[in-house]
Image (cartoon, rainbow, N blue to C red):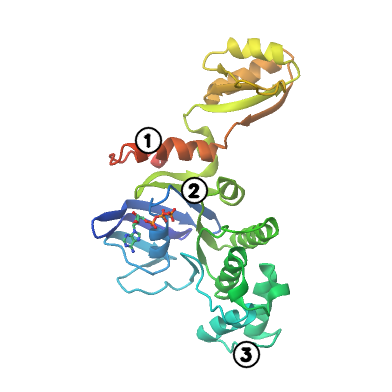
Amino acid sequence: MDARLAVRARGITKCFGDVVALDGVDLEVTRGRIHGLVGPNGAGKTTLLGLLLGLAVADRGALEILGTPVGRALSAPEGVAGFVDGPGLYPSLTARQNLAALAALRGGSGSSGGGSGKTGKGGDVVDALDQVGLSDVADDRVGGFSLGMRQRLGLAAALLARPRLLVLDEPANGLDPAGKRHVHGVLHRLAAEGTAVVLSSHRMDDLEALCSEVTILATGRVVFSGPLHRLATEDRELDYRLLTSDPAAARRTAAATAGVRLLDPGPGAPDTGRLVLRARVPALDALVSRLVLDGVAVRELAPVVSPLEAAFLALTEPRQQSQPQPQQPEGSRR
Ligand SMILES: Nc1ncnc2c1ncn2[C@@H]1O[C@H](COP(=O)(O)OP(=O)(O)OP(=O)(O)O)[C@@H](O)[C@H]1O
């Protein structure tokens, strides 16, 4: 296995009775990267994350994690931490006690059960709570925690294991803006230190803020896997908003540029001077060059929906409507 890879999966298939949750999935996750797993409900994300965490085993295929082939035993591979379906926490214990109990279970002293030790495992507990922004509620019972607070505590619990592969199922669920800032900060720092992070999310903005690579699943199959930026350059038409110093001139130039279609912004849309265009990237490049040559300044050019969201819809919706479909792994155009 390539030493740069934290995960290498080939042809992973997992069935639950008649339901094929994963159908020949290939996945590569590089160390030091945050890899997003995205797909419609029931696409197989949680199932795949569960395999990485050792909560289930594949029916077919090969899975290597941190350089070691995964066998048939149900156990978390060495160096892996995280959670699926929400973190497992004791509601009657405080946040600090939960982490201390986990640290003790993992073989440490965990001596800060009710106290606030600052060294050894106790110090790790204090540090983990601080990293996820829960220091102020460290001695509150978890039973009273909101969803977002439980998610952050689950991340803190995973940090205690100092993972080299962190696996998180929808970690952004329920997070307020401050919680999100903490979680994003922790994940970026872990990645910078060399930890591979695999996370699922339905929030395209989170994925775009966090991930350098994404895998899009649809009905158990990979329909894209690769760098996020490649989605934007896929050979696909997208809608863009364009604001220039001279909207009338820009409209004429756009109308005369092959491959660019001007769209009606819709009845009642405010006249902001922005044009809405549909084009592939090469036609858009040609338009921008012509505008610059004509002395028209381009002040804003942005996709109407993010490239990730557009790709997600384009790659997953047709399959949902007309499943089952043979796999056409557009993303494997490497
Ligand atoms: N334990 C199980 N028993 C039976 N079917 C299951 C089980 N776990 C998952 N499935 C089925 O496998 C498929 C994939 O489910 P999975 O939870 O992995 O999808 P997901 O992408 O995580 O969905 P969501 O976005 O809704 O969380 C679904 O059809 C689901 O019903």
Disc 2, SS: strand
In screen coordinates, is 330 left or right of 252? left
Q: Nearer the viewer, mark 2 or mark 1?
A: 1
In the rendered view, tell whether residue 332 sits above or below residue 154.
above
Q: Which residue is mark 2?
A: 214
Q: Position of residue 209 (x, y in %)?
A: 62, 49
Of callouts 2 and 1, which one flags the residue occurring earlier in the amino acid sequence?
Answer: 2
Which residue is depicted at the point 48% across and 37% down? 311
Which residue is depicted at the point 58% across and 80% down? 98
In screen coordinates, is 170 left or right of 136? left
Disc 1, SS: helix
Q: Which mark is residue 111?
A: 3
Specify the amino acid type for callout 1. Answer: Pro
Specify the amino acid type for callout 2. Answer: Val
Residue 260 lies in quadrant: top right
Disc 3, SS: loop
Which residue is depicted at the point 31% across and 37% down? 322
Tags 2 and 1 in contact by the CB under 8 Å rule? Answer: no
All told, the count of numbered labels is 3
Q: Nearer the viewer, residue 180 or 57?
A: 180
Q: Which mark is residue 318?
A: 1
In the picture, which quadrant includes the N terminus? bottom left
